[in-house]
Image (tube, rainbow, N blue to C red):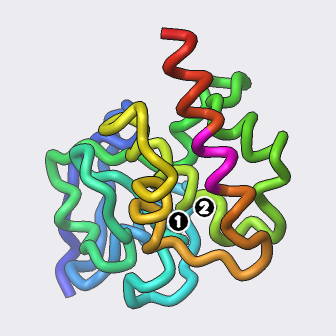
């Protein structure tokens, strides 16, 4: 099958890759671009472990074709920190012990960051609703919700 040439932006870096027309964005990120933060938990868009943003829209990368990335702006968990400096969400996840096995954590961080960019003052209900597409089998959700709520408060205070 003929490969497709794709030019896109991932975490503010211009990238090019060749992919099979049937290859998912998740597979491209992991196998072609060596960005292994997004995980394949289900392959059907039900768990959120592969969450990334495409042009600012939160998506499950297992449901998007790599070829669809042409000309788009993609953000993954690898782009959340600024060099060695963790994002406030990452600090709070550590502080609140809002992670354990790590399979869901990258997707939840991407989803939470997306929420806070759209709504810097979410209610607990809004956080729970926004993160409902991300399944966590280890930590439970209370620590995650508290970490996101506390991050939102800190970020509002800092701005």
Residue 31 or residue 90, whichever sits in front: 90
Q: Residue at x 54, y 37 (%)?
A: 80
| 71 lies above or below 157 | below
Residue tagged 2: 36
Residue 129, image x and y in percent? 41, 65
| 56 lies above or below 156 | below
Q: Residue at x 68, y 45 (%)?
A: 147
Q: CA distance from mark 1 to mark 2?
A: 5 Å
Helix, strand or loop at mark 2: loop
Residue tagged 1: 30
| 108 lies above or below 120 | below
Magenta-tinted stretch: 145-149
Residue 15 or residue 131, whichever sits in front: 131
Q: Residue at x 37, y 31 (%)?
A: 12
Left or right, 78 with reference to 4: right
Residue 44 numbered mark, or none: none
Q: Earlier in the sequence, mark 1 or mark 2?
A: 1
Is 16 colored magenta in this rendering?
Answer: no
Left or right, 105 with reference to 143: left
| 128 lies above or below 159 | below
Residue 132, image x and y in percent? 46, 71
Kindly check if marks 1 and 2 are in contact, taking CB atoms under 8 A apart as contact: yes
**Which quadrant, please, contains the N terminus?**
bottom left
């Amino acid at each position: 099958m003929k490969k497709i040439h794709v030019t896109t932006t991932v975490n503010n870096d211009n990238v090019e890759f060749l992919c099979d027309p049937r290859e998912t964005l998740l597979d491209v990120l992991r196998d072609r671009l060596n960005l292994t933060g997004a995980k394949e938990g289900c392959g059907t868009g039900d768990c959120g472990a592969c969450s990334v943003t495409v042009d600012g829209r939160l998506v499950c990368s297992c449901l998007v074709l790599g070829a669809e990335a042409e000309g788009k702006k993609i953000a993954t968990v690898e782009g959340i920190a600024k060099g060695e400096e963790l994002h406030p969400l990452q600090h709070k996840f550590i502080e609140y012990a809002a992670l354990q096995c790590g399979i869901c954590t990258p997707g939840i961080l991407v989803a939470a960051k997306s929420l806070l960019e759209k709504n810097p003052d979410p209610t607990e209900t809004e956080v729970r609703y926004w993160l409902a597409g991300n399944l966590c089998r280890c930590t439970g959700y209370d620590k995650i919700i508290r970490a996101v709520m506390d991050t939102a408060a800190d970020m509002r205070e800092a701005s």
